[in-house]
Amino acid sequence: MPNATKVKDLMIPLEDYPHIPYWFTLRQAMAIVREASIKYEGFMPRSVLVFDEKYQLMGMLTLRDIIKGLEPQFLKETALIKVDPSLTILTKDLFGPGLKQASQKPVSEVMSPIKVMVNADDPIAKALFLMIKENVGMMPVMQEKKVAGMIRLSDLFKVVSDAVLGDE
Amino acid sequence: MVTSIRRAWQRLAKAGPKHKPHLELSEKYAHFQRLLSANNQVLALMTDMEEKLSGDYLFDFHYIRSTVDRMRAETTALVEALNGMSGNRYQALSRASAQILGEVEDILKRRREIPVAPLVIRFEDLNAEMAEIAGGKAANLGEVKNRVGLPVPPGFAISSYAYKCFLDYNQLSERLTALLNRWSMADLDTLSQVSQELKVMVHAARVPPDLEEAMCQGYARLAAETGGRPLLALRSSAVGEDLTFTFAGQYATYLNVTPEEMASRYKDIAASLFTPRALFYYKNKGFREEEMAMGVAVMPMIQAKASGVLFTRHSDPRRQDAALINAVWGLGKYAVTGKVSPDQYVVSYEEHGRVLEEVIAEKNVMLVSLPEGGVEERPVPPELVKAPCLGAPEITELLRWAEILERHYGRPQDVEWALDEDGRLWLLQSRPLKVSVKKAVEQKPRVFKDYPVLLDKGTVACRGVGAGPVVIVKSEQDLKNFPPGAVLVARHTSPKYVTVMDRAAAVITDAGSPTGHMALLAREFKVPAILCTENATRVLRPGQVVTVDANFNNVYEGVVQELLDTEKETGNDLADTPVFQTLKAVVKKVVPLNLLNPQDESFAAENCRTLHDVVRFAHEHSMREMFKLSENDLEGDLDLVDLETDLPLKVRLLDLGGGLKRGFRRKVKPQQILSLPFKAFYQGLTSMRWPQAKPAGVKSLASVFVSTEEDVAQGASRWQDQSYVVLSQNYMNFSIRLGYHLSTVEAYLSDQINDNYITFHFKGGGSTPERRERRTRLIAEIISHIDINCRVKGDFIEARVAKYPLKDMARRLTLLGKLTVYTKQLDMVLFSEGIVDWYIKDFLREHVGTGN
């Protein structure tokens, strides 16, 4: 039996996400992420959406992006793990003064740009296909050529697993 | 309003740079400046009048006249300026102000009419309220005799009406007027000549028969009461003698007069109204001669063994608990005129008549009455020269009088007394004790070492001392709950504090001007007030008991009883004089403030009851007029120039005068701008992070948040990114468009604290209504933190701060500049109240330095 669920049924509306203008700092973005965990108990949006001045969506900021943006040394010195498997040398560096400085860079430098989007009326199969193909965890949902919300792999996964496990 | 500004901007944008300065707008600004100047003048005049009312200064009618004249000129200029700014839209204010000025004028024109009364009135029938009828001296003798119950000799007053009859009978009025008119102030040399002519005229006049008859009857009664054929003392009892101390001792007094001489001496006393000095005074102060009237007190001569003066309060502040008595042998004239050094006794109240200090002088001569009439100087018998005039019983009795009199009059008295041959004391005169001119000057700054000084700087707005627990007032709720006897402590002054002025022990503020509205109110209610302490709200803790010494700018911890005690005894000795009463009546028409809250409907021109209302209304509305640049203001050829800046901000400038350095063409660099408020604001703008160029190659997707027709209608549309500034050296009106919001920052910054203000309006945003309102809350909280009062309606903020010194205002403008950039599209991120709180804290921590 074909699943009739459409992308728009699982879409999270844009206003449920935290937003940030692209020139804001990583530091400001982190405050938002921390606050988000308080607002959405048990349903924590792990991403912040990045917009430009015209309120156009430019990208997403995941926890991964943020940590990467803070530029810990291990990202540059991958060989280090071989001589110092627990990376004790870097622990100091990670929480040192360099951290605060790095947190001042704009989010546009570290965000993930949008690679792909899906239409609200598309079936969820298409959404799954695109996500796997582009290797993304979430993507914008378009309605009348405008971003209306986001669709996440985790929500699609629930539909798939319900079907497989026969609990539908 | 937003729509009209937008249309105006669109016109502006089309207009482009031309070469003619815009006449109307610069005219409007010139009116505004005139208004500010007039506003300050009027407030300063009010302040001065209230200071005069504090009782520590001498002043005269001339002072009131000239102050009112200046006040009229300035108020009229102020109202005209407001009408000039607004195309005559404030006709109602012109009417209100003309009405009030008319009422003030009526007070000044109020003339003294001599009331119809019996020609002669017995002391038994007199009291203090009858000063118009009998003159001050006689009326007071009646008061002491009948109401206080101290021994006053029997006697009668020849009334002021009798004086009028005397003039009428001899048709003197017209001749007096003619003579006085002939003499001009410019001609001082002829003053004594005119005075002489007037005296001759009065002497040549005849006392009307019915007056002579009345005097004789009065005397007959006296003779019957005292037995025998008493000789008389005739003392001048001029109406309004206490108008000013200029007159003290000016009028004639005759001692030991025979009944036959009575009529002639009466004329002498009447003539003493026209001494050169009195004439000069009256003419100078704009009095009319019919306002000069003389009464006379007639008493049997007391055969005085000793006489003297009793001051119920020692004038030395260190001796405030004591009365001062001086005494000479014989008649009291020598005690007053300083012909001989009198004995002096300083007598303590607290120690029940103990003599604290006694100086027995060498009294070589004395004045005595002659049996046939007249007085003569005689040598004092050798055994009495160095003997004290008074013994303990007399001293005790005089101190008892002093207590009774002070209790009755509520203020220190200056008493003349005589001790007769039988050892009885008589009171011959009692009048308010003269104040020393400007007693504040005499006092040395004082510091009480036993009490910690919490604050020692600031500006005194109302002198005095008050003590009580500190209440820090931040909101109107704090005012509602304000307990009686507390000390009001606040960041800045506000006329709204009037609601607790009857309860406050004192007022202390961090900022504010001594000529501001609240300062005037503090003086009206006599609440000691220190302003501009800078940090009172931080130093003083709620509930902490403090003593505020608003004479010397000190605030002590605890209750300094010594200070409160000394202050209590500083009464006002002038309060009953007509000149004081007139000023009081004028001040009542000028100073009270009825228009308290600009947001109230009652804040209307029609409701102006005093000049203070008028200037407050005009000042408030002048700022509103400057704030709203109407379409008309921006029509026509404008000399606009572009600001050359690295910021992603398109700014066009219009200089109203002194705002820009010379030598620019179509573009100016920021360093060419001289406008004080602009420089402060721009500094804030440039010290923040602005959006950099977008990263290349990033795709952007339109979102559902923008560009629906509805949003456009709400003012959320993205206007052409063009901001405009109208500026001058002290002024700035900056309409900033950043993305989707419009904010207007208007400011006036100068060295004149009263003129300084910042107005801030904020509206709009491209995000959801919820997030826009969160940004509104964020802005409101941040600006409240920097002490700017604001009102919020939905996503619209209206804020105002005024009357801080230049550097404080500049600091706030810089912060507003930073905030403007900080909040650019900040609504976007405000997805929860929690994040709002974080961003508020973040801004305060990074930029205000008060967050934690």
Image (cartoon, coloured by chain):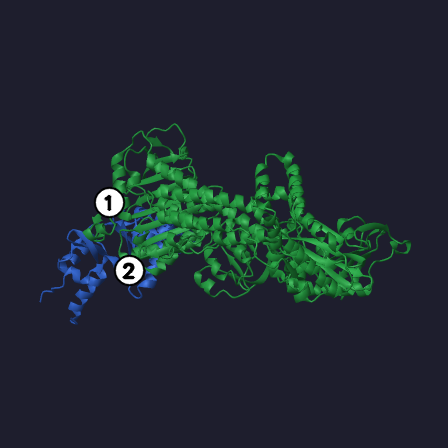
Report whether B520 appears left or right of B813.
right
In this view, B15 is above or below B143: above
Q: Residue furthest bottom?
A: A167
| B24, B482: nearer the viewer | B24
> Which residue position holds label 2?
A45
Counting from the top left corner in percent of width and height, residue B800 is at 40, 50
- Image quadrant holding the N terminus of chain A, namely bottom left
The residue drawn where x is 36% and y is 43% is B83
**Labelled disc at residue B698:** 1
The CA distance from mark 2 to mark 1 is 23 Å
> Tag 1: residue type?
Val
Residue A141 is left or right of residue B810, and the answer is left
Which residue is the extreme one toward the front?
B209
The quadrant of the rendering that contains the C terminus of chain A is bottom left
User: Furthest-left residue in view?
Assistant: A1
In the picture, residue A161 is in which quadrant?
A: bottom left
Work out whether B487 lies above or below B611.
below
The answer to whether residue B82 is seen in the rendering is yes
State the residue in front, B423 or B57: B423
Disc 1 chain ID: B
Residue type for callout 2: Pro
Categorize mark 2 by other alpha carbons within 10 Å: few (<14), some (14-19), many (20+). Answer: some
Q: Secondary structure at mark 1?
A: loop
Q: Position of residue B509 (x, y in %)?
A: 52, 54
Q: Which chain is blue?
A: A
Image location (x, y in percent) of residue B172: 60, 45
Q: According to the rendering, which colour does chain B have?
A: green
Question: Is residue B775 or residue B362 the one in the foreground?
Answer: B362
On what subunit does the disc labeled 2 rest? A
